[in-house]
Image (cartoon, helix red, strand yellow):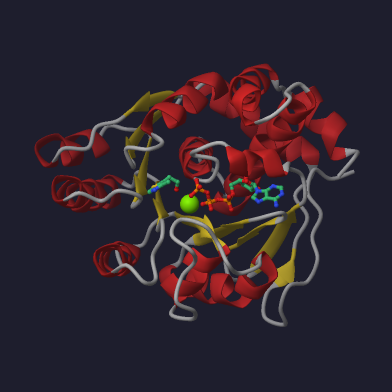
Amino acid sequence: MSAVVASATSADAASTVVPADDVADRLELVRESAPLVQCLTNVVVANATANILLALGAAPAMVDIPEEAGLFAGVASAVLVNLGTPHAEQRAAMEHAVRSASTAGTPWVLDPVAVGALPVRTALARKLAAARPTAIRGNASEIMALAGVGAGGRGVDATDSVDAAAEAAEALARRFGAVVAVSGAVDLVTDGERTVLVRTGHARLTTMTGGGCALGAVMAAFLAAGGDPLVAVVAASAVYTIAAEIAAERSAGPGSFAPAFLDALAGIDGEGVRARALLA
Ligand SMILES: Nc1ncnc2c1ncn2[C@@H]1O[C@H](COP(=O)(O)OP(=O)(O)OP(=O)(O)O)[C@@H](O)[C@H]1O
Ligand SMILES: Cc1ncsc1CCO
Ligand SMILES: [Mg+2]
């Protein structure tokens, strides 16, 4: 039985299945290694992202000033670059961090928040993508806009379906040699050759600020553990969305969901992954 099920999304990419045992193994590796995840992220979600990484068992560090970001990316286990509120100082820090991560071979994740209509972040996202992130994570409209199809979403929200973004995601993955993850009701993960659909999850995740942004940080934590980056990103997405299902059952709305999600992330183990996988 698989934690994630695959189906063909386009003629170009072969569908792939990632077994629940692989997801459980990756979760254990994250817990054992407690990766140090450097986050250059937006001011809206910084605190939520740090709490989510801690709950998972990783170590967050929001090191995002130009004088320190490059230095730190050389020692961090993984780096998240999220373009949600890209002030000038942070933009400069991102360029330092990306250069240093690439030199050190540190995995890094690009989240092109609200690219499309907004000029500064769109140009920056294109420039950073050319520096070959390990993974690119966004909602359907962001991935399509970065690939050069579509004008982006409504602010930070998607106006396109994950299905509609499948071909753009696969093309982007091939162009930049990255794993590309598209979030939505069903999450899609592709490396341009293999495509996986992660069907677990709950819509209440979209009522909590940082639902997508913190997922990028969690992907960075899973990538830090090494191995096949496609499997790492799928495992991150599966663990995250399974925890969201558990939290949704234990909460009444957005307010109680956020702490319940932290508890679920802290409590989930391989057995929990396998149990939910049977339902997927
Ligand atoms: N309709 C839905 N049903 C279930 N889960 C969903 C749905 N939409 C999104 N999700 C989940 O919510 C998480 C965030 O995805 P979303 O597409 O909202 O990201 P985003 O737009 O980048 O979020 P943000 O920028 O607000 O942080 C993902 O784990 C995804 O699986
Ligand atoms: C609301 C918001 N605005 C810029 S970034 C962000 C967090 C969700 O993407
Ligand atoms: Mg987003």
User: For the point 67% across and 35% down, which residue is it?
Assistant: 239
Nearer-the-camera pick, 70 or 209: 209
Q: Point out the residue furthest to the left here.
A: 67
User: For the point 65% across and 42% down, which residue is it?
Assistant: 235
Tell me if residue 55 comes above or below residue 120 in the rendering.
above
User: For the point 77% across and 50% down, which residue is it?
Assistant: 199
Nearer-the-camera pick, 104 or 254: 254
From the viewer's perspective, is 226 left or right of 12? Answer: left
Nearer-the-camera pick, 14 or 186: 186
- Quarter of the rendering occupied by the N terminus: top right
Is residue 163 visible in the rendered image? The answer is yes
User: For the point 26% across and 39% down, which residue is it?
Assistant: 73
In the rendered image, which quarter is residue 123 located in? bottom left
From the viewer's perspective, is 158 left or right of 101? Answer: right
Residue 84: where, in percent of width, then height? 35, 50
Nearer-the-camera pick, 169 or 24: 169
Residue 127: where, in percent of width, then height? 26, 67
- Quarter of the rendering occupied by the C terminus: top right
Residue 10: where, in percent of width, then height? 71, 78
Question: How many badges with numbers are in the image?
Answer: 0
Tell me if residue 57 comes above or below residue 77 in the rendering.
above
From the viewer's perspective, is 79 left or right of 268? Answer: left
Residue 142: where, in percent of width, then height? 48, 65
Is residue 236 visible in the rendered image? The answer is no
Tell me if residue 200 comes above or below residue 152 in the rendering.
above
